Image: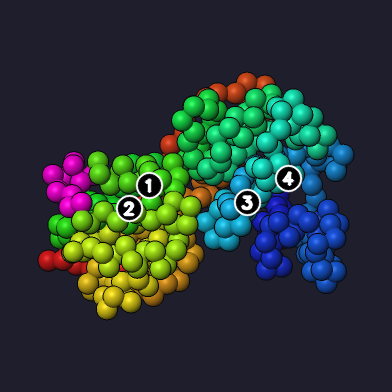
Amino acid sequence: MKVTLKDIAQRCGVSVNTVSLALRNMPSVRQETRENILRAAEELGYSPQKSKSEMRNIGLVSTGARLRDSYFYMSFHQRILSTAYDHNYNMMVFKGSTCDVDPKELRRIFEANSIAGIIILGDMDERIASKVAQCGIPVVAIGTRYQNLAVCVVTEDNFQGGLLAVKYLRNRGASKIGFLGSPRHSTGFMERFQGFLGAMTHFSMPVDPEHLVLDLDPADVYNYEQMLKSLRRRSSLPEAFLCDNDNIALIGTKALLAMGLNVPQDVSLIGFDNTVMGKMAIPSITSVDVHCATQAETCVEKLISFITSGRSSKERILLPVTLTEGESVREFF
């Protein structure tokens, strides 16, 4: 059985990225960690199928905010890196702002770094994403959908997620369901809100405008004080909120507690993304799992198929979601 970077990472208790850096003798890895990784690689019989000179790179382009996201987007980052290495590709990361140049110049930059294909991770200024798409190198976008950019996209079915969440709350007896978030923050957030509205219509459940907490700053959506003020302005609160993601649900839990309300006894919450933080929270967050690993693996495999075949597509690949139960939703009967 082929030994992968993931196997070495698990043996050493480090990330796949750290293993990659150590095997490439990069200076950012501590000497003790590097020696431990090299020893584990030898003991496990790790042997890359291609020499360094034969290796090709996949470029990951994302915004600074996404690259700093320690929990959700880092899951994508790590899974993309791991899958790329399993297919004998290195990965190089480019901040979106550095790609705001003429597409011909961008192509020269990518070719100088042996970039065979590009993954655009998360929402980005469509003007910059368009320059990446025009550079003539295969491109796949993951985790978002661009309105006017014709590239292959791999993302979760947010509309299905909204339906699953509302159906779950309805089956537990909730009749007054609201939405907490900022649809203007990203395409994904907007789709989740639209999925919520569609599900409420599907089940003939009324939507009280007072229960739509949508006035969060899209550029500062995780601002606790802002959320607390917004919730306090409501003349009434719903029995349950569907939240744009687990982070919103966590901040909402804190804000409700400051108002003297408990989750789930007074207000229940459902998030999106099924993050580690959501699982660790008290109460743990019931969440729509968007299956980061499956998205990342599908994205990399699709991109490599474009690279090897010389043919690409502009399809939108919607991957199914599931609902993971936590402790943040009560029975309403």
Q: Are marks 4 and 3 in contact (CB under 8 Å)?
A: no
Q: Are marks 1 and 2 in contact (CB under 8 Å)?
A: yes
Residue 75 visible in the snapshot: no
- Label 3 or label 1, whichever comes before in sequence order: 3
- Label 3 or label 2, whichever comes before in sequence order: 3
Look at label 4 and name its amino acid: Met
Q: Are marks 3 and 2 in contact (CB under 8 Å)?
A: no
At a point 53% along the width and 27% down the height, the residue shown is: 149
Q: Residues within 10 Å of mark 3 (few under 14, many from 20)?
A: few
The dot on residue 183 is: 1
Tell me: residue 16, above or below residue 331: above
Q: Residues within 10 Å of mark 1 (few under 14, many from 20)?
A: many
- From the viewer's perspective, is the residue at label 3 or at label 2 nearer? 2
Magenta-drawn segment: 199-209
Q: CA distance from mark 4 to mark 3?
A: 15 Å
Look at label 3 and name its amino acid: Gly
Q: Position of residue 201 (x, y in %)?
A: 18, 42
The residue identified by callout 2 is 214
* Colour pattern of the rendering: rainbow
- From the viewer's perspective, is the residue at label 4 or at label 1 nearer? 1
Return the residue nearer the eye: 151 or 63. Answer: 63
Q: CA distance from mark 4 to mark 1?
A: 31 Å
- Label 4 or label 2, whichever comes before in sequence order: 4
The residue identified by callout 3 is 64
Left or right of residue 215, residue 140 in this image: right
The dot on residue 92 is: 4
